[in-house]
Image: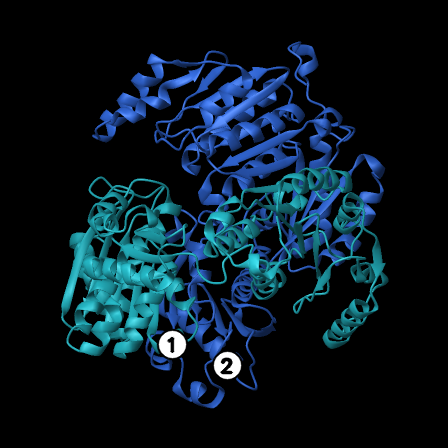
Chain colours: A blue, B cyan
């Protein structure tokens, strides 16, 4: 429950752990499986970073009576209710009306909102149809949350000791509104932490149970005040350090995390949420080196992971995705004799591809992935799931054989992450010659 | 409500429309935003294809009392409740116990399940820890749903005129169980259609409102018996034809869909759910042609969309992702004079890249995408979001300028789909010379 006494608004985690946050995601497109429920992932993660776990997410249809029924139930049991969607201009956007009915509020026409909507249409050079004015209705109680990227503003109501926050559905509208307006308002009310709730140590190339075994002696020294959570992704495991009781402050959590990083050595990847490609990119930029890529089995996924990073041309020379032996020979200078003797899915071909990519694309490092990612096209010597990765570095060139069972959609990202992790380790080794960058790499 | 009289089990849509299906997705990882809720997308779409729309999806924590509270509420109002997750071997997998309590059922140890689990561990050469035996408990009522890809079987209960179906969380276990066991069981009870509920006409490169205007005259002839739903994705719009009353049978729906396809001409993409890359791949295979790709702004996404298709080497020669002018010159033979005069983001460079990709990789078609996908790195002449696409075909080579505002993650797939759609249209034009393949292309 919200207190309006500012002295009671100092966040402390035991109270936060009692808070009931509910997320209502509205829209037939979610229930029909046409659109993934990205709002749950986004809002769930943002709240967790501030020390609050969503208690429930309910997805229902746009139907007015269904919204009213669900909202009534959610409002009765939750402290904070966040709704997404159903605020647009068309006739199936009935969220405002439904919820006003349940809360006993009135909808009033707001001329400021009307002006903002009209200005936005003028700016885009588009004609405003009359149904857009529906978005200018607000409750006769509470605040309007401006929407910098769309026409439907959000609504904020504090009532019955609870908070209601209504946000528009498009992610590019919702996400900045949530970060810039909703989180600060919730923090000001003491409903979540003002800063990060945990410190994350991200590791790569180590299994979850081995990581736990190695880190536990550090954690044991801090007893029950320290809370630890592990989460495994493809080829990386996160370890989240927090102190729900508040006994261990954020600076001390950072110290413990640094101790973990030192203990893990090269298995430590980063603090926070960076991807393997981002960590490699930072190492490459710091050393003013570039990487080039040659792929078959992963078909562009490795290249795409680098080019998702803005300013990729600073550290990424390019990639060649070769599906024929002719292309391997012509684009990457892979010798025909290697392809004939060992085949395209072989350690020898992977080494030639990595070197060819680095040399032809003018890069310092070359990473090659070749193999069968399934479900068809394996051979007896190299069944589906067999992958060869090669790394060309200024210090030499090596290859490794990897093998995973499982479907194509899990084999591809695992192979990409295994290759990226190898590059990361080689870049750290190379950076050891320059003390400054070595320090940066190991935190 | 379920009738056990087989004569009443004939599915007809008006009854299906009343059916309340609820999906309970269990797991802290969903609420913390660590894992996207793919079960909602998968199960929502599978049910929609069989004429049923999920009424509600509730995501809650693994906590035993929270599961019991939510399940009690869902069971009271729904006809079919599907749960996912919480059936594993560890102590936080409490779904069976919670739900047994609500339904007044007992958990009994099943030696058949135990044997199956032990066999699976033996097959994988792994040691079975004792906690795995937890998965051998079943209700004293209802059926066990075998799990071919994991140790936790599903459970099926018919009780109080309702159905409960409990499935394990890993998608590679859940999805085949849902398709092969759950859908047929629900169909046998008359709780969903035995076959497809709608016929989908997929179009590319046409806006939703224009598509509606063009198709409406066809639909008008069939009156209220025909139901139409539109859904827009990046660069394509789907139109779903169904007859909820059952007045128009599936063969006639297919006829109406064919009429739409003929009217749309080259704007018709396919029936069903194929991707643009898959449609291009089928056209290329039918004409025994290959395509090569050159990318900058989309950084491997176009190549990845082709290589996601199994057997890509039959129609895909390869791709070159060039982030430096040196690479463009060396790998794709782009003349230095073009890069100096027009820059790498230009129609001229796009044309040279498409031709270079086709010629160097030995392909019949070449597709090039160059541009700024944002958020940084635009220029005054070519602001962020400016994309040039070029198509090299046996008949000639052309370029087009495209421009979208918006974030990188929406610009990239739109540019890729625009390029794929252009290739698709060119392949259809080329196929017109051979009547057989032209017929295939226009359905």
Instruction: Tell me which residue sits at (35%, 51%) in the image.
Output: B412
Q: What is the number of callouts on the image?
A: 2
Q: Position of residue A155 (x, y in %)?
A: 47, 21
Q: Is residue A64 above or below residue A119?
A: below
Identify the residue under disc 1: B313
Front one among A54 and A194: A54
Chain containing the residue with disc 1: B
Q: Quadrant of the C terminus of chain A?
A: top right
> What residue occupies the far top of the structure in this picture?
A5
Q: Residues within 10 Å of mark 1 (few under 14, many from 20)?
A: some
Chain containing the residue with disc 2: A
Identify the residue under disc 2: A348
Q: Is residue A314 left or right of residue A99?
A: left
Residue A209 falls in which quadrant of the image? bottom right
* Marks 1, 2 in one chain: no
Instruction: Tell me which residue sits at (77%, 38%) in the image.
Output: B65
- Is residue B334 in sight in this rendering? no
- Is residue B174 in sight in this rendering? yes
> How far separated are the C-alphas under marks 1 and 2?
20 Å
Q: Is residue B71 left or right of residue B280?
A: right
Q: Quadrant of the N terminus of chain A?
A: top right
Which element type, helix, strand or loop, lies under badge 1?
A: helix
Q: Position of residue B77 (x, y in %)?
A: 63, 39
Residue B63 falls in which quadrant of the image? top right
Front one among A86 and B56: B56
Q: Position of residue A65 (x, y in %)?
A: 50, 30
Q: Residues within 10 Å of mark 2 (few under 14, many from 20)?
A: many
Which element type, helix, strand or loop, lies under badge 2?
A: helix
Q: Is residue A430 left or right of residue B415?
A: right
Q: Is residue B80 left or right of residue B364?
A: right
Q: Which label sits on residue A97?
A: none
Instruction: Tell me which residue sits at (23%, 69%) in the image.
Output: B356
């Amino acid at each position: 429950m919200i207190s309006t006494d500012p002295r009671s608004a100092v966040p402390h985690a035991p109270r936060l752990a009692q808070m009931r946050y509910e997320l209502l995601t509205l829209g037939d497109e979610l229930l029909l499986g046409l659109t993934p429920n990205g709002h749950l992932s986004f809002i769930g993660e943002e709240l967790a970073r501030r020390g609050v776990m969503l208690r429930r997410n309910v997805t229902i249809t746009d139907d007015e009576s269904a919204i009213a029924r669900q909202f009534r139930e959610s409002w009765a049991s939750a402290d904070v209710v966040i709704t997404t969607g159903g605020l647009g201009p068309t006739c199936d956007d009935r969220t405002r009306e439904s919820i006003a009915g349940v809360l006993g509020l009135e909808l009033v026409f707001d001329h400021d909102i009307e002006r903002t909507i009209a200005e936005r249409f003028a700016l885009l050079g588009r004609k405003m149809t009359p149904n857009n004015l529906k978005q200018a209705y607000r409750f006769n109680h509470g605040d309007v949350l401006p929407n910098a990227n769309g026409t439907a503003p959000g609504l904020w109501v504090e009532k019955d000791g609870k908070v209601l926050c209504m946000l528009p559905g498009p992610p590019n509208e919702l996400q900045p509104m949530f970060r810039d307006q909703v989180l600060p308002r919730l923090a000001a009310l003491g409903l979540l932490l003002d800063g990060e709730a945990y410190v994350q140590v991200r590791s790569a190339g180590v299994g979850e149970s081995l990581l736990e075994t190695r880190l536990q002696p550090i954690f044991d020294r801090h007893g029950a005040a320290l809370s630890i959570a592990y989460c495994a992704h493809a080829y990386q495991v996160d370890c989240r350090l927090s102190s729900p009781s508040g006994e261990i402050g954020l600076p001390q959590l950072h110290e413990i995390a640094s101790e973990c990083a030192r203990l893990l050595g090269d298995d430590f990847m980063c603090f926070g949420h960076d991807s393997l490609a981002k960590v490699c990119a930072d190492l490459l930029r710091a050393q003013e080196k570039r990487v080039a890529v040659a792929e078959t089995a992963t078909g562009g996924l490795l290249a795409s992971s680098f080019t998702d990073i803005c300013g990729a041309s600073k550290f990424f020379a390019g990639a060649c995705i070769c599906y024929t032996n002719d292309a391997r020979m012509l684009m990457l200078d892979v010798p025909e004799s290697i392809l004939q003797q060992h085949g395209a899915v072989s350690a020898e071909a992977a080494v030639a591809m990595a070197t060819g990519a680095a040399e032809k694309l003018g890069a310092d490092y070359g990473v090659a992935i070749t193999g069968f990612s399934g479900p068809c096209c394996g051979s007896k010597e190299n069944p589906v799931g067999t992958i060869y990765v090669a790394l060309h570095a200024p210090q030499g060139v090596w290859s490794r054989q990897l093998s995973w069972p499982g479907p194509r959609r899990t084999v591809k990202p695992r192979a990409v992450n295994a290759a990226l992790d190898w590059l990361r380790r080689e870049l750290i080794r190379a950076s050891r010659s320059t003390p400054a960058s070595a320090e940066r790499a190991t935190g």
